[in-house]
């Protein structure tokens, strides 16, 4: 078994915009160890979101080799990829992406493989949201919604959490509290975490900061 | 939590739209049920009225034989003829009751006898009731049999008539038969000549072709009504496609989230098909209920109530519900494919 949670070797992602080609990833080489807590920073268009999407198997690279927790997603069927996403990867998005018509508890349990209300309530408790389980996402503040999103990402005990601008829509107090939660998850439970962020304050919570520019690490 | 719960949630969340979509199916299904049901009832009524004329040849004793009944030997000769099939016997005889000559007719199909009161079994006509003073429950003794009157027929004609089951009529007359109706695969005229040559003392007639034409026309009417009504359902189904497509487009972001948190394309497709199938099933059931109500109204208007059971045959009810469900699932197929083919990253960017 590999010691790396993420391995990228010469990975390219090319978009065709009319006559010009844009390389969102330009031969990206990157390895992240298991249990690491990493921030990826860089200007808009540097390819950091594309990196996160490819790592989370939401997007497929044009070419190159990459593995997530030792598994080569490009060799898996679409169905197995979905399974890998569900079992091993927890996503946290900038805009929370909760299902607006479901309650907090239902949102949490939506991706759950073995339905276990006690476990879900336990994670809500950990996030300090136990009392809000019957509310709808719209009734919660941004910080609370993002904590629900983190709880949802944790529900199947993933080996990695990928967070795309998790503090992007939050004020600094809420942003710090979200980063503290992620930091504690990494420190206490050993979950590997990668965040993509513009915010140096958020990045300061992590163990290593990688800078991206023009589709590669600089 | 599974996605079927989510599908229900979507239907509930968009109550008005779901209801309007279902309304299309409801109207289509109700139209089919009423049109086909009433036509089926009418067809069945026409068949009942004309069934007694449904034969190719009619065989009776020749007038020269001096008897109006064929004995058992003659009957078996006729019935063993290989050219004939679908045989139907009828025994008509008369007897004296209290000095009056009463005709007894054996009945195979009680639908031919329109009842005013009571039930089939032993049915007297009004003339018997008036002249002999009989009513339901009275006993009549003929030859060695005692019969209890069960009903009174509607007809007003004068001759005294009592209708009894054909097998009882045959039993009373020592297995004699007045008329044998039969079908043949040959040309009826040729078959008739053949039979006359083979058996003496009988007369063979062929029927008119008008009756067959009438029956064929009612079958065609059923087909035509089915066609018209199917167009109504088609409109309903198109509205299901439309609704599901809009619903998928509106939910693009939501579907993206589902994919991002690990639902497979198959699960997402399944939930959309489930949603459209559910609309079809509910619409179908409500449509059938309304259709049945419609049939009852129409039947009462046409004074046709005795044919209500024939107007709602099981094939129609179950077929229409199954059809509406199946077609709705098919209607969801294209939207479901679109949903499962969504690019996650683009879907999540969707507002």
Image (cartoon, grey):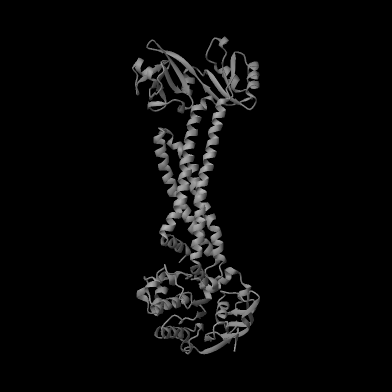
- The residue located at (47%, 35%) in the rendering is B41
Q: Would you say residue A185 is visible in this rendering? A: yes
Left or right of A76, for residue B117:
left
- The residue located at (47%, 76%) in the rendering is A153
Question: With respect to residue B112, does B259 lie above or below?
Answer: below
Question: With respect to residue B188, does A95 lie above or below?
Answer: below
Q: Position of residue B287 (x, y in %)?
A: 44, 47
Q: Position of residue A172 (x, y in %)?
A: 41, 86
Q: Position of residue A156 (x, y in %)?
A: 48, 74
Numbered circles on residues, count: 0
On-image quarter of the N terminus of chain B: bottom left
Q: Nearer the viewer, residue B143 or B106?
A: B106
Left or right of B337, for residue A132:
left
Question: With respect to residue B227, does A88 lie above or below?
Answer: below
Quadrant hosting residue B266: bottom right
Left or right of B36, for residue A17:
right
């Amino acid at each position: 078994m590999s010691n790396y949670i993420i391995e990228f070797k010469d990975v390219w992602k090319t978009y065709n915009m009319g006559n010009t080609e844009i390389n969102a990833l330009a031969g990206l080489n990157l390895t992240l160890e298991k249990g690491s807590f990493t921030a990826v920073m860089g200007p808009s268009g540097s390819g950091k979101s594309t990196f996160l999407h490819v790592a989370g198997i939401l997007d497929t690279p044009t070419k190159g080799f990459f593995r997530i927790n030792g598994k080569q997603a490009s060799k898996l069927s679409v169905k197995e990829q979905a399974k890998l996403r569900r079992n091993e990867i927890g996503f946290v998005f900038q805009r929370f992406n909760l299902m607006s018509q479901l309650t907090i508890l239902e949102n949490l349990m939506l991706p759950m493989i073995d339905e276990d209300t006690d476990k879900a309530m336990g994670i809500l408790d950990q996030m300090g949201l136990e009392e809000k389980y019957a509310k709808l996402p719209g009734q919660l503040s941004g910080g609370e919604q993002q904590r629900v999103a983190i709880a949802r990402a944790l529900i199947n005990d993933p080996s990695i959490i990928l967070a795309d601008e998790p503090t992007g829509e939050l004020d600094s107090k809420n942003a710090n509290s979200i980063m503290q939660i992620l930091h504690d998850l990494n420190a206490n439970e050993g979950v590997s975490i990668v965040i993509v962020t513009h915010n140096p304050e958020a990045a300061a919570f992590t163990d290593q900061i990688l800078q991206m520019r023009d589709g590669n690490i600089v | 939590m599974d996605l079927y719960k989510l599908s229900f949630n979507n239907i509930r969340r968009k109550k008005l739209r779901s209801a309007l979509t279902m309304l299309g199916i409801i109207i289509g299904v109700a139209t089919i049920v009423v049109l086909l049901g009433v036509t089926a009832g009418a067809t069945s009524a026409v068949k009942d009225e004309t069934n007694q004329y449904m034969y190719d040849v009619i065989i009776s004793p020749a007038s020269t034989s001096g008897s109006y009944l064929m004995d058992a030997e003659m009957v078996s000769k006729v019935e063993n003829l290989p050219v004939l099939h679908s045989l139907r016997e009828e025994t008509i005889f008369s007897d004296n009751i209290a000095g009056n000559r009463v005709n007894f007719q054996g009945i195979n199909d009680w639908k031919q006898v329109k009842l005013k009161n009571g039930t089939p079994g032993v049915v007297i006509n009004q003339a018997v009731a008036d002249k002999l003073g009989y009513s339901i429950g009275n006993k009549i003794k003929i030859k060695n049999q005692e019969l209890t009157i069960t009903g009174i027929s509607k007809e007003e004609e004068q001759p005294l008539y009592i209708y009894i089951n054909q097998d009882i009529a045959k039993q009373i007359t020592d297995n004699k038969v007045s008329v044998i109706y039969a079908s043949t695969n040959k040309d009826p005229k040729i078959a008739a000549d053949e039979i006359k040559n083979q058996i003496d003392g009988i007369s063979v007639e062929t029927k008119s072709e008008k009756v067959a034409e009438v029956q064929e026309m009612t079958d065609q009417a059923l087909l035509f009504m089915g066609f018209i009504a199917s167009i109504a359902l088609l409109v309903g189904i198109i509205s299901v496609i439309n609704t599901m497509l809009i619903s998928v487009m509106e939910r693009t972001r939501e579907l993206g989230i589902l994919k991002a948190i690990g639902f497979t394309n198959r699960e997402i497709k399944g939930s959309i098909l489930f949603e459209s199938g559910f609309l079809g099933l509910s619409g179908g059931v409500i449509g059938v209920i309304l259709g049945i109500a419609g049939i009852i109204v129409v039947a009462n208007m046409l004074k046709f109530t005795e044919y209500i059971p024939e107007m709602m045959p099981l094939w129609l009810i179950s077929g229409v519900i199954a059809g509406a469900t199946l077609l709705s699932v098919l209607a969801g197929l294209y939207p479901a494919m679109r949903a499962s083919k969504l690019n996650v990253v683009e879907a999540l960017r969707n507002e």
